[in-house]
Structures are given as structure tokens and as C-alpha cells.
Image (cartoon, rainbow, N blue to C red):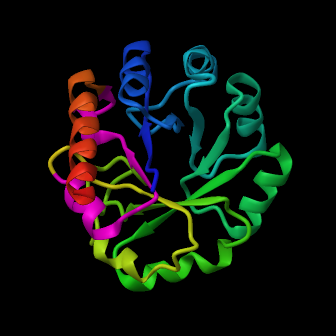
Amino acid sequence: MTLDIKICGLKTPDAVAAALAGGASHVGFIFFEKSPRNIDPPAAGRLREAVRGRASTVAVTVDAGDAFLDGIVAGVAPDMLQLHGKESPERTAEVKARYGLPVMKALPISEAADLGRVAPYRGIADRFLFDAKPPKGSDLPGGNGVSFDWKLLSALDPGIDYMLSGGLNAANIGDALRLANPPGIDISSGVESAPGIKDAALIDAFFKAVRNARERSAA
């Protein structure tokens, strides 16, 4: 099985280059002012040129309005929109119809009952992203460096396409892949030297850890 790997929250040419060199299938740009990974559409549009034809570009927003999304789509021309807020199934459908782009809906997970949130979005969202619920007091819906019990995902319908996110890093990705066997993984803070600062060495180490884990599972 192929494994999609998304490096999210990129802001610099060096970070984009490291993600592509490692073999990222997706790169994510975050458009959310409260995030240390926030980037504006013109800057993301410039970075996007290096990605074109090599990986899919994902624009990450949080409860964004149409005008804001219009600017992102015009300035970045993303391949996919990621909705990481409290967007309803109806809003998700509106966004998908307005831009004609596939949509990935992020859902926070902390217990088995949270997987029940998937059903209303099936047939609307093209993919899901399962992230840990943010700690109390956090202004960020994701990128908090916390994880959830990956074994919960064993109860999912195997037909559900998703990316696993939340607290992943080179040290624990082997366990995550073994326990959840996800079709895709998403990492942001786990390859940073400080909030919002991507580290090329950590990105490289993460890709090596993924390769090593997959080689062990195939042995």
C-alpha cells in the first residue's frame, strides 16, 4: 500500500525543498493568523511554484469565509482545500461546490465516540484528517504536538480515506503506522526546531523513520 505523506505548515523555500527531497506527496500551507505557521497567499503562491508537478498543494483554513477563500484559491491555486475548523457538512459541501476542488475535513479525536462525526461528512469530504483534540486553552485546532490513541482507528470502515495527524515525530511514527496502518500521515510541529520553524534535518529524519518502519513491516 502506498503511503501519502503531508508536511504541513511550510513557510520557506528551504522547508519546501526538504519536504520535496524527502518524498512528500502533499505540502500544506496554513492560512490562520493565530498559527505560528501562518502564511499569506502571495508568499504561499511563490512557494507553490516549486511544488507544482511534484506534490499536491493543500491550503489549510479554519472556519474561513468565502472572501478569504477566494483570495487563497486565486493566489495559490491549491490542489486541495483542508477545512480544519468547525465547518458543518453543509459548509463543506458549499466550499467544495464553489471552488471545484477536493476537500479534506479535519476532525478532532480523543475517544471512540468521536469517530461518529465522520458519518455526516461521508460523500461530501473527499478525505478526512484525524487530529488530536487540542489541549484546553489552545488557540490552535491543530499543530499542538499532541496525539491520541491510534488504536481507535482500527474501528473505522476500511473504505474511509484519511490522514493521521497529531503529535507525530520520528520517534513514534513506527508505532503509529503499526497500530493504525493509515493511508496517509500529516506532520507539522514534529519536524520543527521551534513553533513554526521547520528543520530540514528533522524532516529528513522523519522520512528515514517512515522508510525504516515500512521496511520492517514488509520483512
In this rendering, would 71 be left or right of 81? right
In this rendering, would 193 be left or right of 61? left
Q: Nearer the viewer, residue 65 or 78?
A: 78
- 37 in the magenta segment: no
Is residue 194 visible from the viewing direction of this image? Answer: no
Residue 178 image-quadrant placement: bottom left
Q: Considering the image in quadrants, where does the N terminus appear? A: bottom left
> Where is residue 17 shown, x and y percent of the image?
41, 18
Residue at x 58% of width, y 63% of height: 86
> Where is residue 42 shown, x and y percent of the image?
63, 17
Segment colored magenta: 172-197
Residue at x 63% of width, y 19% of height: 45
> Where is residue 219 shown, x and y percent of the image?
21, 57
- 190 in the magenta segment: yes
Give the answer, above or below, for where 165 lies relative to 8: below
Residue at x 35% of width, y 60% of height: 134
Residue 93 image-quadrant placement: bottom right
Tell which residue pokes out farthest to the front in this image: 219
Residue at x 27% of width, y 42% of height: 211
